[in-house]
Image (cartoon, grey):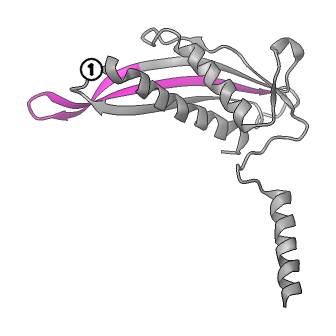
């Protein structure tokens, strides 16, 4: 009885370790390097330096959660990501009777081009996509007092969305 359980446990462990990772990341074993170009800022109302924050956030995410190594574009990295900050806006949401607004919404939109230099002809491995996320906040709150926290929350979600599209077959 113990031998069957041990054997079954061993087989399960081999199967699980061979075909599944807890992180769910799917990176070609031949892919070792990446490059992230500095994001461009095409959003006139964006905070100064937000495009650099986005670039750094994506590089940090890739460094923390993949085995890939950063390489300059001049060294022909396996993967390139080119991003643009497309929109940064605050809009009024949830109107109340008497023309009072209960909520405002901060929205950030970025466009990203993903280039797999080892598979340039494969349209599924090379893509362009927009990523958008928003956070609602109380209209009575001064945006300048919470803006950094809201941007951080949105930035974290955008990086997660990009990462999932690029590396988890999202």
Residue that appears at 88% across and 15% down: 75
Number of residues whose C-alpha sits closer than 10 Å to that of mark 1, classed few (under 14), some (14–19) or many (20 or more): few
113 falls in the magenta region: yes
- Residue that extends furthest to the front in the rendered view of this protein: 2
Rendered view: 5 above or below 13: below
Q: Position of residue 8 (x, y in %)?
A: 84, 78
Residue that appears at 53% across and 35% down: 157
Q: Is residue 147 left or right of residue 87?
A: left
- Residue that extends furthest to the left in the rendered view of this protein: 98
Q: Please, what is the dominant secondary structure of the magenta stretch?
A: strand
Residue that appears at 84% across and 91% down: 1
Residue that appears at 74% across and 45% down: 25
81 falls in the magenta region: no
| Figure quadrant of residue 59 | top right
Q: Position of residue 168 (x, y in %)?
A: 70, 45
Q: Is residue 87 left or right of residue 77?
A: left
Q: Position of residue 82 (x, y in %)?
A: 69, 19
SS for callout 1: loop
Q: Position of residue 102 (x, y in %)?
A: 21, 33
| Figure quadrant of residue 53 | top right
| Figure quadrant of residue 36 | top right
Q: Is residue 22 left or right of residue 135?
A: right
Tally of numbered discs:
1
Observer-nearest of 55 and 78: 55
Observer-nearest of 63 and 108: 63
Start-end of magenta stretch: 89-116
Q: Quadrant of the C terminus?
A: top right
Would you name the residue on which mark 1 appears? 142
- Residue that extends furthest to the right in the rendered view of this protein: 30
- Residue that extends furthest to the bottom in the rendered view of this protein: 1
């Amino acid at each position: 009885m113990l031998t069957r359980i041990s054997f079954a446990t061993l087989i399960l462990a081999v199967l699980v370790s061979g075909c599944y990772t807890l992180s769910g990341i799917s990176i070609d074993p031949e892919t070792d390097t990446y490059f992230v170009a500095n994001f461009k800022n095409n959003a006139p109302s964006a905070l100064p330096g937000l495009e650099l924050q986005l670039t750094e956030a994506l590089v940090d995410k890739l460094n923390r959660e993949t085995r890939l190594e950063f390489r300059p574009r001049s060294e022909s990295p396996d993967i390139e990501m080119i991003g643009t900050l497309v929109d940064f806006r605050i809009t009024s949401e949830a109107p109340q009777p008497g023309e009072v607004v209960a909520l405002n919404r901060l929205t950030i939109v970025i466009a990203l081009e993903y280039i797999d230099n080892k598979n340039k002809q494969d349209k599924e491995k090379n893509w362009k996509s927009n990523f958008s996320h928003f956070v609602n906040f109380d209209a009575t709150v001064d945006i300048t007092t919470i803006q950094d926290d809201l941007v951080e929350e949105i930035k974290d979600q955008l990086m997660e969305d990009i990462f999932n599209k690029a590396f988890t077959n999202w």
